[in-house]
Image (cartoon, grey):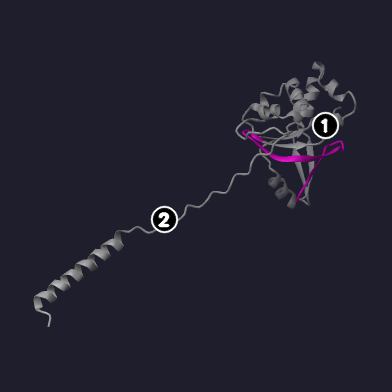
Amino acid sequence: MISKSKFLVTAAIASALSIGAAATAQTTPAPAAAAPTAPAATPNPTVGGAAMEATKPIAVNAAAAPNLSTLVTAVKAAGLATTLSGPGPFTVFAPTNDAFTRLAPGTVEKLLKPENKATLAKVLTYHVVPGTITFADLQEKAKANGGKVVLTTVEGEPLTLDVSATAVQLTDVNGNKSFIETPDVKQSNGVVHVVNGVVLPKLG
């Protein structure tokens, strides 16, 4: 038969173990929930094999792209390099070197002459739209307008875009057509869409 004193000691030990276990349970932190993983940023497309840095302005990135050298030369000749390095934002439809070769022979050389600076600026600003307009923006605008988007350029005349799920065709006021080759090249002061043709405003 267990004596009363032994029973009390046994009960006290059991009680102490029970309290200790409860204390341990209360002080053990729950496993931390895993932090949500941020979605990976979409890398900026390269242009002409050159990296385009989204932290740099349009004029700087264009100068780094070997297939935009004719455009860069024209921008400098028209006195627009400072503008395209400014805060913007701008959306630029940037013609490649090959795009300029599709113009009538001698057109580029003529436009680059100092006496034609105003005309050259008119042509180049017809490729620029105020604000940042991405490929997704164009698709959304097109849904509400039968697949077409009409943008008013910095030059002042409209540029018509036919937008599908995979392609954007540009049509200028003269009926000339070109396509976006590389969309959504992010810039610190807007976005560039590389195009395979030169669009032209009314030139008199």
Q: From this view, report whether residue 65 is shown above or below residue 36.
A: above
Residue at image location 87% in from the left, 25% down from the top: 107
Image location (x, y in percent) of residue 84? 67, 28
Q: Quadrant of the C terminus?
A: top right
Residue 98 shows which numbered tag?
A: 1
Image location (x, y in percent) of residue 88? 64, 32
Q: Is residue 198 magenta?
A: no
Name the front one of labels 1 and 2. 2
The answer to whether residue 200 shows anywhere in this view is: no
Q: Quadrant of residue 187?
A: top right
Left or right of residue 29: residue 67: right
Image location (x, y in percent) of residue 175? 87, 38
Few, some or many C-alpha atoms within 10 Å of disc 2 (few <14, some 14-19, many ≥20)?
few
Q: Quadrant of residue 98?
A: top right
The tag earlier along the polypeptide, 1 or 2, is 2
Image location (x, y in percent) of residue 133? 68, 41
> Of the residues shown, which amino acid type is indicated by label 2?
Ala
Q: Quadrant of the N terminus?
A: bottom left
> Of the residues shown, which amino acid type is indicated by label 1?
Asp
Task: Pick the residue in front: 164 or 96.
Answer: 96
Question: Which secondary structure, mark 1?
Answer: helix
Q: From this view, report whether residue 137 is shown above or below residue 129.
A: below
Q: Which residues are magenta?
A: 165-190
Gap between marks 1 and 2, in whole Å?
A: 57 Å
Q: Quadrant of residue 17?
A: bottom left
The residue indicated by pointer 2 is: 32
Question: Which secondary structure, mark 2?
Answer: loop
